[in-house]
Image (cartoon, rainbow, N blue to C red):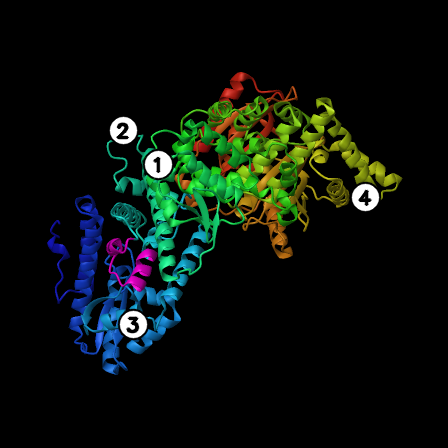
Amino acid sequence: MLSQPASTDLRPDMTTAEFKQSIKSLDLFLQENIFQSAINDTLNKRSQFFDALLCQLWQALNLDNSHISLNAVGGYGRQTLHPFSDIDICIIHDGQLSATDGAKVSDFLTQLWDIGLDLGHAVRSLDDTFQACKDDVTIATSLLEIRHLYGNTDHQQIVLDALYGQNLWQSQAFFNAKLSEQQERHAKAQGTSFSIEPNLKTSPGGIRDIQTLTWVARKHFGVASMQSLRRFGFLTNDEYSELMECQHFLFRVRFALHQAAQRSENRLLLQHQAEVAKLMGFGDGMPNGESGNIAIEKMMRQLFRAMKRIGELNKILMAYFQREIIPQLNPQIIPINDNFEIVDQYIHVRDETVFIDRTQIMALFEFIAIHHDKIIGITAETLRSLRQVRRRLMGDLQDFQRCREQFKAIFNHPQGMGLAITLMHQHGILASYLPQWREVVGQMQFDLFHAYTVDEHTHKVLKNIYAYGKDIKTLDKDLALAADIYQKMSNKSTLLFGALFHDLAKGRGGDHSELGAVDANMFAIFHGLKVSQQKLISWLVENHLLMSITSQRMDIYDPEVVNSFAKKVGTLTRLDALYCLTIADIQATNDDLWNDWKASLLKDLYFITRKALRGGFENVLQIRTLVREHKQEALNLLSANEATTTEIKTLWKRLPIAFFSNAEAEDIARYTQAILQHNQTPVVDGEYNTLILLDDAVVKGCSDVFVYTKDRHGLFVKLFNTLAALRISVKQAQIARTKDGYVVEAFKVLDFDEKPITSAQRRKQVMNKLHQVLDNDIALPKKRESRRHQSFDNQPSIEFLHSRKSTRTLVNVSALDTSDFMEQIASAFRTLDLNIHSATISTVGERADNVFSISNKQDQQLTADEQQQLSVALVNAITG
């Protein structure tokens, strides 16, 4: 162990400033020499330093140490003190604390706060300590790790004797409390550590899972460490070494995370991952410019692997503990065959050598699907046997013909995507079966809308599709259509295999959809699937983003858009499968990504395309007939007389077709009536007299903002930025010009809480601000940029699309959804003196997708040279 510098030495006469400097010197020394020592030695050294500091201050106060003791508890008691962890102490005294000693204790705590320590403390008598332990298992748990620092030497043992006994907490009650805590903690993390920003402490497989094992072992067996468990037969030497190796890695990551965040932080946030990887040495030796995401990827994969191993060992040990602490006198045993049985709802292997026959590995999970109503997990012995044979698998399980049949049987079984697929994922069997799956285990996705690694995301997609098989009445209304379609499918496994492969080619370079389609086709052939299944599976993988992109980026009520989409889909079978996969994919991407707006768009596109496919592509043009029907329905709703009808039709002739194609009859009637009334309002010269509608109507899960006003320079940008300043997110936007110089603009928006604007007061505030900005040119406050965007490169994507109008150019601009991206885009248009005729805006994750219909100064389509100039101008404007 390296010698500490003199600047970390402590003296009795040190001032508060000198104490702070000494702490700073120690932390700097430990950080600079982190790779020179084992992480436990580093954490112990830090604990020992604070032991000396606290004892020095304690001694200086001349407390009655025969009746009072100073003790470390919690993480400090374990001597695993990370750079910004709390200093947890417990001051225990006999009987009542005298006024003199009470004042001294208060002075002691004040000095610690003055030094700047994050302190967790309690001052209790022995009796109060026992009562607190009885009342709160968290306090009892913390005191299991009590470590005497100064004063009365008996208090530590008295407390431990009481806790090890059965008076304060019986072993069964304590175990159940710790198990319940762990289950709640795991449920909060949705049962996975494979999120993009895992919590090193509380996620499944995190540090808390090891601590839980230690606490239960200490309470019931009275052991000082996990190492002692080996003599009880619960933990093999290899498993103990594995557990300690994983713990040390997590400790190093947490130490580096505290350094990077400069605070106590357990969640490995995106914004810290690059710095943590650097501090961990993962970028060392890589060429400049290549160490960023690659270093993060390497670190995260190793982290996820460690957390997965900890999770497995935790399951094994907790099962053994439960059996020892709460024994079942008459276990219920249900035989399955010569190799397997069910013991108290856990599948159990009768002979630990069974898995020498590799087909029995797949049989295990097939039986879990078959007996799904009787099984809730795998016994500890079976899991241990599975882990041992898994290490020795030299080839892929799919090389065995019988395994291939069993794998297909699991996907064909109605309950195969239930517990069976989850346990196959958690215990590495999917990785042992599919080489493509093995490549994406722990694969990061460097964006803001994917919340999970590729393998965990794919697992969630399969689980979402599995949920479609439930009673439709129990599902959210957004899933009712998908459930109805799925339940009527003749071959559900085709969709599931498509879902299995849809993202497995990520991280290889190139288009993951195209690469994945090749893999999926080879898989289907190798597994003897029908030719029709082979084609559908590979088509689904190659086109799994098609429906999402079409619904969110394009005008799905435009006949040309629907025509093009229908041609790409081709059959109702493909449409049904794609719709189900698209919803499952979006919902598995991020818990906050799915909303009523997306559900409505996908549902509309599904039905429009279904009608087109059934009637032939020419029937897509019947959308114009639908527009005429909407007009007639709107007229009926308006109950217009002859004179008013003429006035309405005159107005409608001025309005673009988009006004009618994107709205229901009720909305058309509402907008029309408002415009007619608005036009009767006298207009003072020089005033814009803008019409703004924002009522309590919810359209497609969003609030509807409608604007009708005279066209003028920068209008759309002002409107968009006003909403941004009000913390209102625009999910969809349509603008179109009338024939006489007016503009109609329709926005689908959600408030800052990602919900429609339901408060009348809030709607009034929004409308007033819009009027101030649009009619009175009131300046807008600058919207503060989200810190999360700082971790992402704002590189725009520019794409010119086919336009059905000979005088218009369609351009798609995808960029980071910042507060000023619309102004940046508009400035590029102004630079080239281009005209905006219409726009469709939608947001996908942290990016905004914008499709503009534009023309040049001559009101014609842009030439190839003009398109190139615009691309350069847009990139320059957005990237600065």
Q: Residue at x 66, y 22 (%)?
A: 805
4 or 2: tag closer to the N-terminus: 2
Q: Distance of mark 2 from mark 3, alpha carbons? A: 59 Å
**Among numbered discs 2 and 3, the one appearing first in the sequence:** 3
> Which residue does the image show at 18% across and 50% down from the upper left?
29
Amino acid of disc 4: Leu
Residue underneath mark 2? 287
Tag 2 near tag 3, CB within 8 Å = no
For marks 3 and 1 on the same chain, the one whose residue lies earlier in the sequence: 3
Residue labelled with disc 1:
297
Q: Say which element carries label 1.
A: helix
Relative image position of residue 266 (x, y in whole percent): 35, 51
List the single residue furthest toward the right: 642
The residue that disc 3 covers is 162
The crowd level at tag 2 (other Cα within 10 Å; few <14, some 14-19, many 20+) is: few
Q: Which mark is residue 637?
A: 4
- Magenta residue span: 212-233
Q: Secondary structure at mark 2?
A: loop
Q: Is residue 232 shown in magenta?
A: yes
